Image (spheres, rainbow, N blue to C red):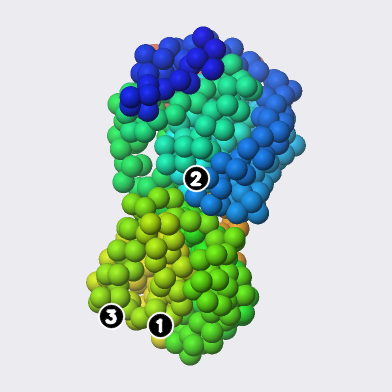
Amino acid sequence: MSQATMHVVDPSTGEADPAVIAQVFDAQLATALKWRESTAAERIARLKKLRDAMLARQSDFYAAFEKDYRKPVAEVDGTEFLPVLDEIRHAIGHLKRWMRPTKVWPTMAMVGNTGWIEYQPRGRSLIIAPWNFPFNLCFGPMVSALAAGNTVILKPSEMTPTVSAVMARLVADTFAPNEVALFEGSLPTSQALLNLPFDHIFFTGSPAVGKVVMAAAAKHLTSVTLELGGKSPVIVDETADLSMAAEALMWGKFTNCGQICVAPDHLYVHESVKDRFVAECRKVLSTRYGATPAEQRNSGDLARIINQRHTQRVAGLLQDAQSKGAKVLAGGDVDVASCYIAPTLLDHVPAEASIMSEEIFGPVLPIIAYQDIDAVVREINAGHKPLALYIWSRDKARTRRILTQTSSGGVAINHCVMHYAHGNLPFGGVNNSGIGNAHGHFGFKAFSHERAVLKAGPVMTARMFFPPYTDTKKKLIRLTINSLRLPTLF
């Protein structure tokens, strides 16, 4: 079966044929078994083939992103292509070392034996990607999966149909379906895929859907990596560089129209510097997107919200907050028909407003004045553990205290969002914001089984544990137990 034939969806439903999905899944088994023996050179060749195919279609992706939600070319390059290309480059440069078995020292009870860890491909992997970064969050995990020697089935979001179609053509032209396949469709296609006993599932999306994916995986005891989200807080204290904080935070919040899983969700700023900080933020927004509502609407540097339904959702959060007393400090302009909401700063947002409990995932940023940093920490700890935490401070002791007293998937100090792009850092959430890590070596390990191997030495010391238990054996066992009470030398 060719890729071209395989990816035709039922025009009446827009869904992939479950029988074809099952056929491709079955066909990938033989490949997955064969690829257990794949060399670093063979895996690198696949990554290079993917890279070359991506670069050959850059202009197609620019046009697709423009059509799906008016994403600026610079943002396509910076947030879609650059992370994936860097992931490929990093994997190519380090794969031989990652694949090398890792020797381990014997513990006291294992003296005389040799042990090491081998990294074995998990097998057939499923990657389900969201709509906010449809290329990055589909192909980025695929780089890790291919580097680890797995076959891949991709399920992109139906909300970015033009981008998904370009990705489907790229995959079809680059890989055989028994190696990598892509299925377009919506919920029924996802359900058909989740019914299959994959060896690993990598899902990026909301915590609510993450629970559905995890429940489906549990039926087959399939391992999962869940990259979820949450309400990522920002703290700007009285020692922060306000100009730099405004520059970075207005970028991290309003890039991709705020539709970023690690976007600043709400911001705590010390009351003594709040007015100055807000003034800096307004200045940045005016410089970047325009000084008037009309200029901002016509800005070529602002993406749009993905569709009218999501625009209405974010507009509803904004309206609810205003009806309960919130004040607009900047922005507030809404046009649901064109999926547009201006970059908006809110003040005096009451705790009972929905925007303070729901993940915003749009271009609206509540700003909350605080006096006591301990109260802020308590408020952060009262909610779900976020995917990211951002701290702006020159006070090292306070920064360390916040790090110690809170929990989040990742942290950026005097920056935001950029920890996502650091290939030598694990990227992932904790509890409600995710399970497992991705990127670089961590992504390679997510798609690998760390297989323990023990080789007996010339003298089999375990014989003393074999029946019959003579007095001599009992003494040796007791001596061994007593030796474990001794303090370690290291």
Nearer to us in this view, 270 or 302: 302
Q: State the image coordinates of residue 378 (x, y, percent, origin top left).
A: 35, 72
Nearer to us in this view, 143 or 54: 54
Residue 386's quadrant in the figure?
Answer: bottom left
Q: Which residue is mark 3?
A: 325
Single out the mark in the foreground, 3 or 1. 3
Mark 2 or mark 1: name the one nearer the start of the chain: 2
Kind of residue at badge 2: Asp
Q: Residues within 10 Å of mark 3 (few under 14, many from 20)?
A: few
Q: CA distance from mark 2 to mark 1?
A: 40 Å
Kind of residue at badge 1: Tyr
Q: CA distance from mark 3 to mark 1?
A: 18 Å
Q: Does residue 476 show up? A: no
Mark 3 or mark 1: name the one nearer the start of the chain: 3
Q: Which residue is mark 1?
A: 370
Residue 291's quadrant in the figure?
Answer: bottom right
Kind of residue at badge 3: Gly
- Residue at the spot 51% in from the left edge and 71% down from the top edge: 294
Q: Is residue 330 above or below residue 171?
A: below
Nearer to us in this view, 485 or 158: 158
Q: State the image coordinates of residue 306 (x, y, percent, origin top left).
A: 44, 50
Local secondary structure at mark 3 = loop
Residue 87's quadrant in the figure?
Answer: top right
Q: State the image coordinates of residue 85 (x, y, percent, origin top left).
A: 68, 41
Q: Which residue is mark 2?
A: 68
Q: CA distance from mark 2 to mark 3?
A: 35 Å
